[in-house]
Image: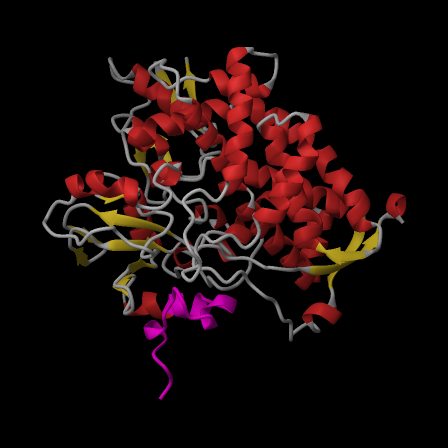
Amino acid sequence: MAEDLTSVDFFRDGRLTDDPYPFYQALRDKCPVSREDHYGVTMVTGWQEAVHVYNDADTFSSCISVTGPFPGFPVPIEGDDITELIEQHRDDIPFSDQLPTLDPPTHTNHRALLMRLITPKRLKENEDAMWQLADDILDTFLAPGEGEFIKGFAGPFTLRVIADLLGVPEEDRPELLERLARGTHGSAVGNADKTMNKTPLEYLYEVFATYVEDRRREPRDDVLSGLATATFPDGSMPEVGDVVRVATNVFSAGQETTVRLLGTALKVIGDRPDIQRRLRDDRSLLPNFIEECLRIESPVKGDFRLSRVPTTVGEEALAAGCTVMVVNGAANRDPRRFDDPDAFDPERKNARQHLAFGRGIHSCPGAPLARAETRVGLERLLDRTTGIRISESHHGPAGDRRYQYIPTYILRGLTELHLEFDLAGGDS
Amino acid sequence: MKVTVDEDRCRGHGMCLTLCPEVFRMTDDGYTIADPEEVPDGLEEAAKDAIADCPEQAISEID
């Protein structure tokens, strides 16, 4: 008898790293809201059910959003309303000072602070800078006619974009980028067997604390001064630590994820010459192509919530204190929402209904940034090449490819992507 | 004060639903619309917060 896929340990079993989608489907077929066997996590794999949970921040606390069942809630959970219990213990949960784990009203204030840092004006200036940032890296990356895309382009490009967005001074960028490039790949988040560090980006904290303190003492005409003097919605001045946490959050949340999106996009372009040709012929297809990449491979597999009170999701009753994983990557392939969900269709009409960025008050504030980065990166790659292929010596021939994915239960994406290029006139 | 949601820009983050539920609501497709477009008295600040905090800059004030 075939193994019942739903009994596999999603959080620790390496067999699900390469292809978690049959597992998601099996769970969804059983029930779009179902408890997995190993840690008692309620897995939400249906689109409508996922939207429901994300939009109900009154019932579902985000205090465990980043770590889920590891280490889990610090004390045994009892009672029909654990609102008070959460407030008493939330500071003992990893990442408790980070935006994704905050609940209203604290979340509302800190999120507003973030929106004051990445203003429409700043995003526009940042997008204008992306073209040059991409070209600077491509000059070196494309020259040999082949290369590893994740470390050769996606990583350095996204880091430089965020450094630019936050206004890191030019002279400081090389050291900052070098230290982050060394430290951020394969982070401990989402790996059940690695120790949880409460602040994995301590170096960034130090650097940004110095920037903020400097600019508060002596404001200049620069982006960091705007960041240093931004206020909460009620006009009060945040502590230096509050600003620093929000700024470093942009790095920690916005870098790895966008790298994975870029990886998926290039994998599709390399694996599907037909799609590559259509994109080359008609660049106006790029935005929907990017949405379909986000749908088919959500860079964040999912996000956790803790139910405060008894509630119902779909047709399932949940008790207070349920650890819920909203599985974005599963909801995005729910056949009740997306026809033929496992097929990649760059012109899929409702691709943008995917939940790769979540929904509700915690939905990814960097979504427009991620899309802009991906679009600019793809535009320049298509401009500067006439053909992009998957390297057969690394990944095997078409029809029998081998790819490796990040082994965590949080992130989904390639660890390496080896490509070959035919360079366009100016580059050859 | 009147507001509108640009349906091409909206990606259904739903921030506005939380900040100003009296004006914004979610459609079955998972996007938000302003319904009513006319912001009731006393909710102007909440509507402005929704405009400022929309990740897609999809909400705007109309005359």
Give percent across and percent down for residue A358.
Answer: 40, 45
Q: Quadrant of residue A222?
A: top right
* Residue A69 on the magenta span: no
Q: Nearer the viewer, residue A40 or A120?
A: A40
Specify the farthest residue to the left.
Answer: A79
Using residue A264 as the reference point, say whether residue A329 is left or right of it: left
Name the residue: 35% across, 46% down.
A94
Name the residue: 67% across, 42% down.
A178
Give percent across and percent down for residue A328.
Answer: 41, 53
Of the 4 image quadrants, the one containing the N terminus of chain A is bottom left
Name the residue: 48% across, 46% down.
A352
Q: Nearer the viewer, residue A33 or B24?
A: A33
Q: Quadrant of residue A24?
A: bottom left
**Taking A383 as reference, is B47 above or below it?**
above
Q: Nearer the viewer, residue A243 or A303?
A: A243
Using residue A2 as the reference point, say whether residue A214 is left or right of it: right
**Taking A98 as reference, is A225 above or below it?**
above
**Taking A423 as reference, is A100 above or below it?**
above
Question: Magenta region: which residues?
Answer: A1-25
**Taking A275 as reference, is A357 above or below it?**
above
The answer, for residue B59, to whether it is visible in the render is no
Give percent across and percent down for residue A124.
Answer: 60, 26
Name the colouring of the figure.
secondary structure
Tag count in the figure? 0
* Residue A15 on the magenta span: yes
Give percent across and percent down for residue A87.
Answer: 21, 38
The answer, for residue A306, to whether it is visible in the render is yes
Using residue A275 as the reference point, say whether residue A121 is left or right of it: left
